[in-house]
Each structure stands twice: as C-alpha cells, then as structure tokens.
Image: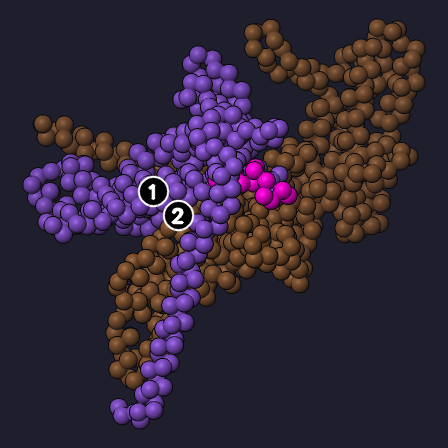
Chain colours: A purple, B brown
Amino acid sequence: MILSSGEQTRRKVYNWAGRCVLFAVTSVAALAVLAIILFIARDALPFFSGNDAGTFLFSAAWYPAHEPPQFGAAAIFVGSFLVTGTAVVLAVPPGIFAAICMSDILPFHVRQVLKPVIEMLAAIPSVVYGFFALAVVAPFLQGMGRWLPGNFEIASGVNALTASVILGVMALPTIVSVSEDALQAAGRELREGSYALGATRAETLVKVVLPAAVSGIFSAVLLGIMRALGETMVVWMASGNAAQIPKPWYNLLQPVRTLTATIAGDMGEADQMTGSAHYHVLFAMGFCLLLFSFACNLAGEWIVARQRRRLRGG
Amino acid sequence: MRMSTRKMLDRAFTAGSCLAVALMALFLLLVLAPIFVQGAGAYVFRGTIEYRRMMLGEFERGNELRVAQEWSEVQRARRPIYEAMAAFERELPDLPAARRKELKPSFKAVREGVESLLGPEPGAPLPALTRKIYGQTRWGGAREKLSDILFEETWDYSGGEGRKVLVPRQPAFEGTALAPVFPLLQNGLDALLRPRLTFYPRFLTDGSVDAHFFGGIGPEVLGTLYLALGAMLIAVPLGIVAAVYFQEYAEAGPVLTFLRSCVNTLAGVPSVVFGLFGLAFFINTMHVSQGKSVLAGALTLALLVLPTVIRSSEEAIAAVPRAYKEGALALGAGQWRTILTVILPAALPGILTGIVISMGRAAGETAPIIFTAAVSVGRLVGPADVLTQPTPALSWNLYNLCTEHEAVDEIRHVQYGMAATLVLIVLALNLAAILIRARVAKRLKG
C-alpha cells in the first residue's frame, strides 16, 4: 500500500499521541498506590514526630481518650497477629487438601460444579460474614461452653476464636484457588513419571507434586495472610474489641482488638478532629498495615522469582 | 512398605482431600442457609392487624374500610383484657400490703408487655415514637412478647452456675381480677392480632420508619447501587485503557516491571487503608465534597477494584487469538483501529466478566466507605445529590443495625433481610459472570 508522505507522518503522530495518552492513563492507575503510600505516610508522620514510636510498638496502654492520651498499641498488634495466625493455621491444611482434591482427584465435571462454590465463598461480602459471626456463631459458641470438657465458662461469644474461624473461612478460597493453580502448573510429565515408577496417587502428590509446587503454595499462604490481616468488618464485629493481650496469650476465648478494627471504629470519633493525635495514630496503624502487606507482597514475589530461577537452571 | 498399606494410605489421602472440599461446601451452606431462610422472613411473614394499621398509617397502603372493620372487631376482642387490667388496678390498694408488694412489679411488667404486644390502650394519648404507636406487627415478635407476659425470666443459681428459668406469672395472680387475662392472651392471641400471611416485596424499595422498626431498606439499596455503579464508571475506563497498554503497547523493561508491581501492590492494600486514603486524599486534600459523599466513596471503591478490572481485562485481551490481530493488520488497519474494532470486541465478554465481579465486590465492601460515603441515618438520596451528599448503604447499615442500633434483637428480621438482599445482589452479579464465561467457553469451542 502506498501512502503519501503527509499521510504517513500523520499516522505516525497519531500513533505516538495515542501511545502517550495510554501511557499517561496507565500511569495514573499504577501510581495510585504511590499516592496511597504518600498520603498515609503524610498523615502518619505527625504522630511519630510528636510521640515515641517505641511506646507505640511496645506499650499496651491504649487510652486515646485520656488526658494526656496514651497510644500504646502493642495489645492491638498482638490481637491482629493472634487472630490472623489462628485463621491461617485453621485454613491452610484444609485449603491445601481441597486444592489437591480439585486439581488431581475430582473428575472434570465435579470440579466445574465446585468452582462456583469457591467463587461464592470468596464473593460473600465481609460484613455478611461479620453478621453471621455475630448472629449465628457467637450465640452458638456461648452455649457451647457447658459441653466442653472442664465446664468452660465462655463469657462472650465474640472473641478471638470466633473472629479467627470466620477469617479462616474467608481466607480459604484464596488459598485453595492459588494453590490449585500452583499444583496444576507442576505439569503432567512429573505426575506421569512418578506413576510410571509405580508410586500411588498419594505418594505422587505428597513426594513429587507438592515439592514442585511448594513456592506457589507459599504464595497462596501469603495471600491468605494478607487477606486475613487486612480484613476489617469481621474482626470489628466478632473479635470483641478489647485492647488487651489475652492471658495466657494463647487463650482464644478472650476478646481482642485488631489494627483494622481500631482504625474503623475510632475514625468515626477522630475525624471530627482532623489533625488530632488520635487521628494521626490511626494513620500510623494504617501505615503499619501497608508495610505488612508490602512485606508479604515482596516475599511472595521473591519466592516466585527464586522458583523460576531454579526451574530455569534445571 | 507393603502394597496393601500403601493402597490404604492412598485411599485415606483421597478421602481426606475430598473431606476438605466437602467441608468448604458445608461452610458455604452454613453461612448462606440461615441468612436466606431468615432473610426471606423480611419479605414473607405473618403480619398482624397492627401491621396492616401501620401500613395504612405510615405508607397509606391497604384497604381502609376493611382495616377499620377488622380493627373494630379486634378491639371488641381486646376489651376484656383492658377491663380486667383496670379492675385489678382498682382492687390493688385493697390487697394486703405484702401481696401488693409482691404483685405490683409483676403487674407493671404485664401491663408494659400488653402495651408492646397490642399497642397503646384505646383512649391513651398517642406516644411520640412511631414504634410505640403500633403493637407487634409480626406474628413471631408477638409470640415472643406473649412469652414475656406469661412467664417471668429468673436465674436459678442452685446448681452452682446460673441457669435461665421461666416462671409462669399466672399462679401469683390467682384469685385477683387479673387472673383471666392470662388464658385470654394465651388462647385468644389469634383473635387479638389476626395474623395473616403477608407478602412485603416493597421491603426492597420502601424507606424505613423510626430507625428501621418498620418499613424497608430502599435508601440503603439505592445507596449501594449508586456506589457500585459510580465506582465502575470510574474504574472501567481506567482499567481497560491500562489493560490495553499493558498487553498491546508496553515493551518489556524496567518501566513496565515497575508499573506492574505497582498494580500488584495496589491489589494487596487492605480495604480499610483505602478508606483512610479516601479520607486523607479525596476529602481532606482534594475537597471533592464538603464531607462524606457518594462521589468520594465511589472514587475510593474505584481504586479498590481497579487491579481486578485491569487483570481480568488483560486476561481477556491476551486470550484473543493472534490470528485476529494479524488479520486486521494485514487488511491495512492501523494499531488503533485493530484494537478498537477487532481486539476489544473479541475480548468484550471476558472484560465484562471482570467488570461484573468487581461490581459485586464494590457493592459488598464496607471498610472503604465508612469514612468516605456512608451514613447510618437513612435518607433517600436523589441522583442530583450524589456529588455532595453521603448515603446509607446496605453493607454499612447492616453493620450499624446489628451492633449500634438501640434494639438490636427487635429488628433481627431487618438485619437478616438486609444481609440476604446484599448477598443476593452480589451473588446475582457473580452468577451473571459465570453465565457469561460459560457462553464464551462454548463459543470458543465452536
């Protein structure tokens, strides 16, 4: 096709301009995350300049309404980690087993039916899970105490355990679908080689496929941790919201308070006084959450990159 | 290891894995069943005469003549109760002091119970709160109130730990004028309240009366739709453009790696941090509105769903066969035209799937809108107010009603109705996505 030179220049300019516009819009979308970091940090900094970061991290005296206020968030950090850790411990074993079942055991059409189940579990809004915890699980758990050995007295159905169980259910779909992808990516040849050597399916899966997919499963667990740590509504509604370190620390039947729930619950009072220390401490907590999620993200990417290198290396 | 042991281990492993999947399905059922079963109770229930009076009084709905006739019949049935209560009040001062002291608080409880069961006594001044003008509008609530009247709840500490015991009130009143009230209430509740199967589909669109004691969830549903649609209006163009750039234009290099890891990071930001950002940036820095507004909420939600929209659009674009693109380029179409007329139309169903799923996510999120858009007092927001006004929303108001409401237990049906409606909206969107995907799969198969 022959075009006049003017037409050709015009096309080139158009293409170039279009490219620039696309790049600009894409940058806006991508750089939003930088804006988030920037603005959370901007509103978190005044807290760290006015208060001691050591007290914030290591003191458990959380009295934001006192005069002078005390912002020791150690109990809140412990609460967040306790609830997240329990949720992940509860969700990872069934999650991995379910992923194995979905990828290697169930026939194709059963899997097609079960996929929507996972999607629905993931799609149910967190506030509905919270409501379920509050209206169904908490009263049930409260009545359970009598049946447990040792005649427990469960003071309240909203405690760390309730929140953890529900968070575990919420993290399950993420763990299952990401692990399943990792298991499938391990490839057919690996499995067939193992079967050819006479291994049973369980042996193949445990000794061959799982080790090959271990990095993907790690990143699934990391994503599950991120989901549980960043979840707000369920822990706000079901964890009891008491800023205290449970005694002993593994006593899950006591109420705890998490970072996300503190931000959500206190900002209602703090936002009329934008600029107060209470307002800034909540941003400091948000900043810590951001840091955790970055750390998880980086760890996940590092694991995936390492695995890729190893595979390439043979 | 012996063969039989290995086989047995293999079977146990299979059974364990299947159990895990079954467990997951069970969880889904456990969560959804109570919410749907109880949630249906907000739309279909046994409504009493008080419900029909309330509908007539607050919403001007129903057959005025029939309600009036029914009301007069019901009042005739109720008269003996009020008469007995008045008679007891008259004879109360004449009772021996000890008996009087014993019966007085119980009588007070009975009287309050009757008031909340049947509404204020005829002739009494109308209460200020709407919830007190009418008796129990729902048969379920009426049964609970009846049990409060008939039985006194006490705690029995004889076995060491406290146990709830229901003690009937009637024996204490034996021989007084109040005694006949109890059988009248217990056996004649049907005649006193006239329950009838009621369908209330307009629960979905009605405004609420007196802090959700009566009425529906219309403002919340509308607010949720505003927020979800607004978020998609902002996120979809941005997301599709970014996906086109990533798939069709970007060249591998540090810039691309950086942009991609930015998008990945955005996907991992906790939802409550989005809320903080919305407050700090859109409201306190950009001043898109005076305070909370639908616009600020939609902007925040748009950021939240952006990574999902970008990712799913990218996948859809990448799935378009290369031959399509090459064919278009060979016919002399420029890159622009190829993208607009060939690639995007072919990728549309996939893109749509992502959009629909993200919309469900935006509709269900609560944490990002707490500081940017949501208010608990329900007022219907008109389309003209979206730029400046905050709105109630299903997700936030569900939280609010089941934790901060003054009478959490009395409006359980509204909470369940809200939860069921929200889940239905989200699942309907997901179902739509599944259907679109199934159609695409079929078309690709040929």
Asked whether B407 or A265 is in front, the reply is A265
Q: Quadrant of the C terminus of chain B?
A: bottom left
Residue at mark 1: chain: A
Asked whether A26 or B330 is in front, the reply is A26
Q: Secondary structure at mark 1?
A: helix
Q: Residue A119: horizontal and vertical position, in percent? A: 40, 48
Asked whether A56 or B126 is in front, the reply is A56
Mark carried by residue B430: none
Q: Amino acid at mark 2?
A: Gly
Whether B61 is drawn above or below B412: the answer is: below
Residue found 78% across the figure and 21% down from its top:
B109
Measure how far apart labels 1 and 2 are at the Cα level.
9 Å
Magenta stretch: helix, strand or loop mostly: helix
Q: Are marks 1 and 2 in contact (CB under 8 Å)?
A: yes
| Residue placed under numbered mark 1 in the picture | A296
| Residue placed under numbered mark 2 in the picture | B268
Residue found 81% across the figure and 20% down from its top:
B108
Whether B295 is drawn above or below A283: the answer is: below
Q: Residue B47: horizontal and vertical position, in percent? A: 71, 41
Left or right: A267 in relation to B260 = right
Q: Amino acid at mark 1?
A: Cys
Residue A128: say if magenta.
no
Q: Which residues are magenta?
A: A272-284
Asked if badge 1 and badge 2 are on a common chain, one would say no
Q: Quadrant of residue B81?
A: top right
Residue found 87% across the figure and 22% down from its top:
B84
Visible residue check, residue B349: no
Residue A279: say if magenta.
yes
